[in-house]
């Protein structure tokens, strides 16, 4: 669906930030972008959403990102935004204030696509319920707190149901229930999800494939097992909790050997991974 | 107390009517119409606001213009002299002309902006397929000023926390000027980010759109619309024929 | 086009703020004209004058034509490279000021009899006393004060634009007219 071919990004001083990256994202994929530096993952998100030239005009890009075989910059911007949605970390930016209720604000995303009224009501109500903000639906978005506005903004974007949903640090302003609601929505989401979040509780719960940003370059991993394997060899430098929790979060079948108290002992971990595979 | 808040269409026609009559009717009629409008607004729910604005802006302006115009024709035929100040007929006519026109026009415009909220105007324009970003600018223009002021006061608060002296006006002014331009850049950057973000929500869509709650005219609105259109046509015909 | 529209979407807000001071009320329009182009600047001018007439004085509504002229000229001057040097910006401001005065004189004469309550009225009285027609008196007053006002406006706009971080400025289509090419 999305294909990066020899993607190279250079910053103002001609220093390559991303070099020769090639990977492919398939339909209904769940991909996490992992890295110590959130600017880099943001950059990659922008590139995948096709807005890099506008947010970072001083960067030079070579290679290409193809969406359904077409270079992403060449797709008409309106068509592109219907298919690929990028949710910025400060999702507050997504709230337009054109409508004076939360319901109107979320519904506006659908009104602009011209679908029928009943369908809009149904879809907006459903997304508000799933974010547990249906009580706010008649409030003015300007009067909400930061966390509530963030949920409204996420709802306003997700309600459009784009084919590719790119979430940049979505958990930044969310409380625990908010995170749980978001995760359940993302798990049930019918479409490709690309998520860049430093919080392992988020990415591990959603993603099945990973792209790690390292000093040496960007490496795609095709399965949780592959990522764990690389972690085990100390080839990846990302913030992860203890092995035990990571495996649990990655929803890998795991039979805990009572004798193995520390999963840092590589031998036992290797056995577990072999068992998984 | 009149609680009626009209639909954008009759209010807009009302504004057109006021502007046309401000330039066509005679001085006496203008004064009479203005006074009638003012009386009408005293019974309206937003009357207080409208009248207060008129007293604050229009009356001083009218007085200033009246005096100004009265004295601005010194060379023409003397009419009467009060306490050594010479008045001329031309001057008084011009003063009447200006003050009556301003009173009428400004009363109309102030009423226009009080009878209709920017929000309702925006949603009406939205419903009529005006590009949604235009509606966005219209609605957010004023909110943005508040946001800027809020940011400024926030920064002042943190400056004070950091122990910056902000006691007298001069110090505060100096501190404000220093952050004004960086804050402006921040706002510009945020705005351009917002533009990209809203584009992601489909704000550049040119396809047909649905309106969830269309703002339709009630019966009173329709009657008023027809009435005002009639008056407008009458005035226009009269000024063309005469 | 979409880029212009989207930028306008954001810039409209910035402008609404910059409008507010009584004079220098075209700073926002000038900045948008330089950064985004003529059409966005015109839209900015119209909307900000409408909002200003709702909030400040209803008179603002009648000066929309002046704002359109300022937007048009500022856009053209930017393309001619008038924002590359501060003295050029001031000259551009003076030119725009003269044109603005010519456009707004009939409006303010016909509507207000030349009064603005802005401290420049004594000039009208002075010119009137020297025996000029009212329209001419108002025009002379405008020609005396507007170029100064617009000169300062353009100078401020130049300062704001020249100090703007390159990364930010590059997002806008007017970038090439605002910075000299790096050698």
Image: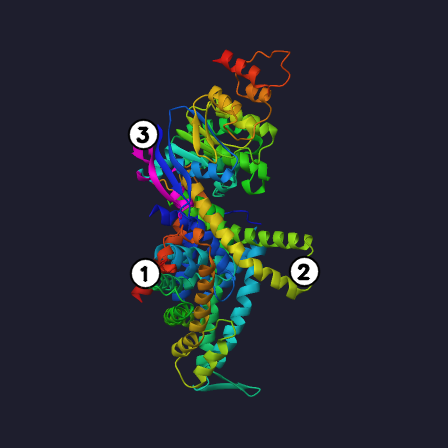
The residue wearing badge 1 is B237
Is residue A41 depicted above or below B60 in this figure?
above
Residues indicated by labels 2 and 1 sit on the same polypeptide chain? yes
The residue wearing badge 2 is B166
Which is nearer the N-term, disc 2 or disc 1?
2
Secondary structure category for the residue under label 1: helix
Give how far across and how far down residue C169 sits, in percent. 42, 53
The 10 Å Cα crowd at callout 2, few under 14, some 14 to 19, many 20 or more, is some
Give how far across and how far down residue A105 sits, in percent. 48, 38
Quadrant in which the C terminus of chain C is drawn: bottom left
Does residue A174 appear in this view? yes
Disc 3: host chain: A
Q: CA distance from mark 3 to mark 2?
A: 58 Å
Residue B47: mark in rendering:
none
Give how far across and how far down residue B184 sits, in percent. 51, 55
Residue under the image location 41 percent in, 70 percent down: C87
Question: Magenta residues?
Answer: A50-74
Secondary structure category for the residue under label 2: loop
Determine if the magenta segment contains residue A72: yes
Q: CA distance from mark 2 to mark 1?
A: 64 Å
């Amino acid at each position: 669906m999305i294909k990066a071919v020899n993607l190279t990004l250079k910053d103002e001083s001609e220093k390559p930030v991303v070099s020769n990256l090639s990977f492919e994202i398939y339909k209904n994929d769940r991909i996490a972008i992992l890295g110590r530096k959130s600017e880099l993952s943001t950059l990659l998100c922008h590139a995948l959403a096709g807005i890099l030239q506008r947010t970072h005009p001083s960067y030079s890009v070579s290679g290409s990102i193809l969406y359904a075989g077409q270079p992403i910059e060449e797709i008409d911007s309106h068509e592109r935004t219907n298919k690929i949605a990028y949710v910025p970390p400060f999702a507050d930016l997504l709230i337009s204030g054109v409508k004076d209720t939360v319901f109107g604000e979320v519904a506006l995303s659908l009104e602009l696509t011209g679908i029928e009224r009943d369908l809009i009501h149904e879809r907006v109500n459903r997304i508000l319920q799933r974010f547990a903000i249906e009580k706010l639906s008649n409030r003015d978005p300007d009067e909400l707190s930061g966390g509530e506005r963030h949920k409204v903004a996420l709802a306003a974007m997700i309600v459009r149901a784009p084919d590719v949903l790119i979430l940049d640090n979505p958990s930044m302003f969310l409380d625990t229930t908010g995170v749980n609601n978001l995760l359940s929505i993302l798990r049930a989401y019918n479409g490709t999800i690309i998520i860049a979040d430093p919080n392992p509780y988020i990415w591990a719960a959603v993603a099945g494939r990973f792209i790690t940003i390292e000093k040496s370059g960007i490496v795609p991993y095709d399965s949780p097992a592959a990522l764990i394997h690389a972690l085990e060899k100390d080839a990846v430098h990302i913030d992860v909790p203890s092995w035990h929790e990571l495996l649990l979060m990655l929803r890998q079948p795991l039979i805990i050997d009572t004798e193995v108290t520390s999963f840092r002992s590589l031998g036992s971990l290797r056995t577990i991974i072999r068992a998984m595979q | 107390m009149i609680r009626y808040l009209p639909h954008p269409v009759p209010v807009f026609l009302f504004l057109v009517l006021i502007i046309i009559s401000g330039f066509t009717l005679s001085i006496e009629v203008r004064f009479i119409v203005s006074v009638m409008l003012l009386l009408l607004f005293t019974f309206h729910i937003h009357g207080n606001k409208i009248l207060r604005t008129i007293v604050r802006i229009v009356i001083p302006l009218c007085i200033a213009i009246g005096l100004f115009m009265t004295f601005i024709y010194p060379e023409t035929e003397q009419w009467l002299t009060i306490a050594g100040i010479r008045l001329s007929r031309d001057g008084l006519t011009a003063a009447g002309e200006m003050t009556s026109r301003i009173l009428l026009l400004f009363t109309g415009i102030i009423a226009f902006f009080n009878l209709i909220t920017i929000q309702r105007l925006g949603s009406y324009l939205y419903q009529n397929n005006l590009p949604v970003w235009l509606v966005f600018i219209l609605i957010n223009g004023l909110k943005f000023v508040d946001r800027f002021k809020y940011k400024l006061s926030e920064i002042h608060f943190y400056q004070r926390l950091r122990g910056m002296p902000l006691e007298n006006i001069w110090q505060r002014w100096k501190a404000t000027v220093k952050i004004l331009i960086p804050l402006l850049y921040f706002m510009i950057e945020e705005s351009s980010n917002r533009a990209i973000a809203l584009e992601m929500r489909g704000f550049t869509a040119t396809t047909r759109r649905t309106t969830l709650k269309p703002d339709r005219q009630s019966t009173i609105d329709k009657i008023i619309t027809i009435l005002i259109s009639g008056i407008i046509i009458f005035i226009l015909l009269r000024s063309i024929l005469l | 086009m979409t880029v212009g529209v989207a930028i306008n979407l954001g810039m409209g807000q910035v402008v609404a703020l910059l409008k507010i001071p009584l004079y220098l009320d075209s700073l926002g329009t000038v900045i948008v004209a330089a950064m985004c182009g003529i059409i966005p600047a015109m839209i900015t001018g119209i909307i900000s004058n409408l909002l200003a007439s709702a909030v400040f004085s209803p008179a603002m509504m009648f000066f929309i034509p002046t704002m359109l002229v300022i937007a048009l000229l500022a856009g053209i001057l930017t393309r001619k490279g008038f924002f590359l040097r501060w003295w050029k910006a001031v000259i551009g401001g003076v030119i725009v000021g003269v044109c603005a005065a010519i456009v707004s004189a009939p409006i303010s004469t016909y509507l207000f009899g030349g009064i603005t309550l802005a401290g420049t009225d004594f000039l009208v009285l002075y010119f009137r006393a020297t025996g000029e027609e009212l329209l001419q008196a108002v025009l002379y007053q405008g020609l005396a004060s507007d170029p100064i006002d617009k000169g300062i406006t353009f100078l401020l706009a130049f300062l704001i634009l020249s100090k703007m971080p390159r990364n930010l400025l590059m997002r806008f289509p007017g970038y090439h007219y605002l910075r000299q090419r790096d050698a």
